[in-house]
Amino acid sequence: MRETILSLDGVSKTYGGKPAVRNVSLNVERGQITGFLGPNGAGKTTSLRMSLGILQPDSGTVSLFGGPPRAQALDRVGFLPEERGIYRKMKVIDVIIFFARLKGVAPNTARQRGLEMLEEFGLADVAQSKVKELSKGMAQKVQIISTLIHEPEFIILDEPFSGLDPVNQSALEQVVRKQAEAGRTILFSTHVMEHAERLCDKIVLIAKGQKVFDGSVSEALARVPRRVTIEVASDRSISDVLSGLGRLDRTPSKEGMVWTIDLAPEADAQDVLKACVEADVKLTRFEPVRAHLHDAFVHLVGQGTAQTEAETV
């Protein structure tokens, strides 16, 4: 069994009578990349702050490395907060050394690691520049380096891709993979599903402060209705041909009619093709549609929102 690094057990938090997090439980296991996903305002940041003891839950318990999130445990964590902020008047290398020293890294080691990481991030030439002279993307890279400089066992990144251009987003994905390959445990929040789909071993999805899914990416994708798109070279209605195979939708096209079939649980794409061939339907397009995590996100959030609204009626 893997060691549980972080555990939230039934945690809730309310601000001014409005629930931000409601009875959320989750486990982060050693060596995993876990994506903490949800729309903006879903309660992700509040949950992460409770994980680190920055906020105290109104109810429920938090365990970090087997105990409360106290200073000794927090020294083993690297945290990139959603609100970016580093000392603008300090030199870049001095900022990195400062954050390393806060985590107990010796000065010479901090400087050496800092220079090496600046080189790795393509920032070697700005080591002696002041932070205020950097672009927004470069400053964010410096903050990421400051998060990783003490080689933490557990890395928590709150919306790490926000504000980065596509090139730097891809570079950050490589950093996350490299940290995982080095044996670090990673938890990151995001509302951009593409990053989670490429990176995560496990995802936890919350909506309106409640957990609506906890499992692997493949398990999340399995919750999305399977879909087939076909195009017919006429405006002929084929609803009778596809009856019983799933929910049908149609839209006109230049070539005739496009039909979308959300497959019933017992049906598959080959059943659609077989039915069309047997009925002599002339197809100009037959396309089983691969679901993406974005589709699962929309589907599961919709289910979670409906459940929350039903509970409050």
Image (tube, rainbow, N blue to C red):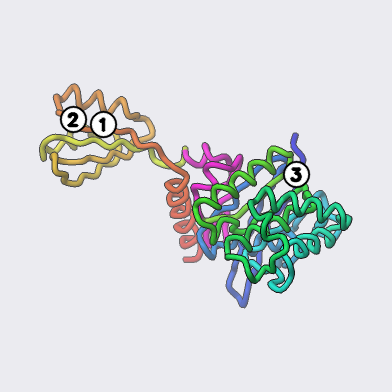
* SS for dot 3: strand
Which residue is identified by label 2? 283
Report whether 191 appears left or right of 282: right
The residue positioned 50% from the left and 59% from the top of the image is: 39
The residue positioned 15% from the left and 28% from the top of the image is: 281
Residue 5 colored in magenta in the image: no
Q: Please provide percent x and percent y for residue 154.
A: 74, 49
- Distance, label 3 to label 1, CA atoms, is 46 Å
Q: Please provide percent x and percent y for residue 279.
A: 15, 25
Front residue of this view, candidates 22 and 53: 53
Report whether 134 appears left or right of 260: right
The residue positioned 43% from the left and 49% from the top of the image is: 299
Residues at discs 1 and 2 in contact (Cβ within 8 Å): yes
Please determine whether, in this image, residue 11 is positioned above or below residue 264: below
Which residue is identified by label 1? 286
**Amino acid of disc 3:** Thr
